[in-house]
Image (tube, rainbow, N blue to C red):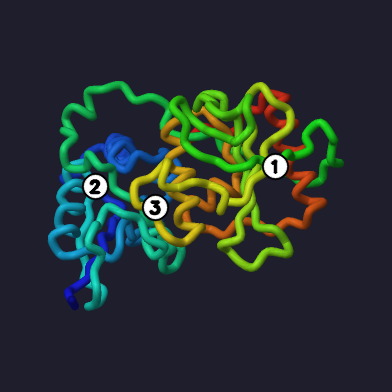
Amino acid sequence: MTRKIYKVVLTGKSVHNENLPDVKRRMARLFKTSAPVIEKLFAREKAVVKRGLTEDAANRYVAAIQKAGAECYAEETASGPAAEKPSQTTEKDNASENGKNALPLSETAGKADAEQDRAQPQGKGGPRVIPVQTSYKPEDRFSPRPASWLRASPAGLDLGEKPFRDVQWERIAALAAYIPDEGDGEEDIRFLLFLSDEKRPFFLDAKQIDYPSFQESPPAKTAAAFRGFLYFLCRKNNTMILEETTFDFLSGNTLPRFTEERALKYATAVGLLIEDGDEGDEG
């Protein structure tokens, strides 16, 4: 059935001149994402928060965002088959015009009381973001090892090997993603997953992730599903390290392309940062 389709747009301002840092903090809670991601949204002119919505769904988004104290509006974009479940993230949700970001709304959006949010002390809002130089000579002790798969486990992650069938969230030390130089495109994503008590990172293809075990109704496109997975990990462990270009990928940027040799240098560089206890920039 053809119906009007809407997007929700942030103006970058607060409602009734509310304190903007407080508004940004509540927005991070509302969307269950990190403070730097919200900062980037507010820094852009007319940042798109959500696309492909029915009029009723768009109005619900606007109400929830305004309740958090941010000024926004719904704008009609086209007529066509609108999404039946607006809370699901689609590829268009994560891609954006002119680099504008889009975020999935929390399942509890509209239910949280903004006054209660103001009164509660806030923890650290996101991962540690660290730029990595790939000029290091690869070291064997940081040589990536392949994982059989990546699924949700009772306490965290299941990586397929017997000692790593139930890795707790807090053991995740860092994650760094890239596109192989010989890859077919932006959907061909590889990533390195570092655990706090292991020198060698796990090496996975983003297609090896069992997304339904982490997300309800994940997007069909790998890049969009992987973004959703990264948001999920950041909520579960807000002290993990995200390599800077991987963090920028959350905001809609493209991952870097690496040859196999450069990917090995990448693994060594991240491993050395973890070993040296580099704190990076807290989100």
**Is the Cβ of the residue at disc 2 closer than 8 Å to that at disc 3?**
no
Residue 173 is drawn in which quadrant? top right
**Is the Cβ of the residue at disc 2 closer than 8 Å to that at disc 1?**
no
First in sequence: mark 2 or mark 3?
A: 2
At label 1, which amino acid type do we have? Pro
Q: Is residue 62 left or right of residue 282?
A: left
**Is the Cβ of the residue at disc 1 closer than 8 Å to that at disc 3?**
no
Q: Is residue 144 left or right of residue 55?
A: right
Which disc, if any, is residue 70?
Answer: 2
Q: Secondary structure at mark 1?
A: strand
CA–CA distance in space, label 2 to label 3: 27 Å
At label 3, which amino acid type do we have? Pro
Residue 185 visible to the viewer: yes
Q: Position of residue 106 (x, y in %)?
A: 28, 43
Residue appearing at x 50%, y 34% in the figure:
127
Residue appearing at x 81%, y 31% in the figure:
141
In front of the other: 146 or 198 = 146
Residue 237 visible to the viewer: no
Residue lying at the far front in this picture: please name it.
162
Which residue is identified by label 1?
146
Which image quadrant: the N terminus? bottom left
Q: Position of residue 237 (x, y in %)?
A: 47, 29
Residue appearing at x 64%, y 51% in the figure:
190
Q: Nearer the viewer, mark 2 or mark 1?
A: 1
Q: Position of residue 159 (x, y in %)?
A: 59, 35
Q: Position of residue 229 (x, y in %)?
A: 46, 45
Which residue is identified by label 3?
218
At label 2, which amino acid type do we have? Ala
Q: Secondary structure at mark 3?
A: loop
CA–CA distance in space, label 1 to label 3: 24 Å
Q: Nearer the viewer, mark 2 or mark 3?
A: 3
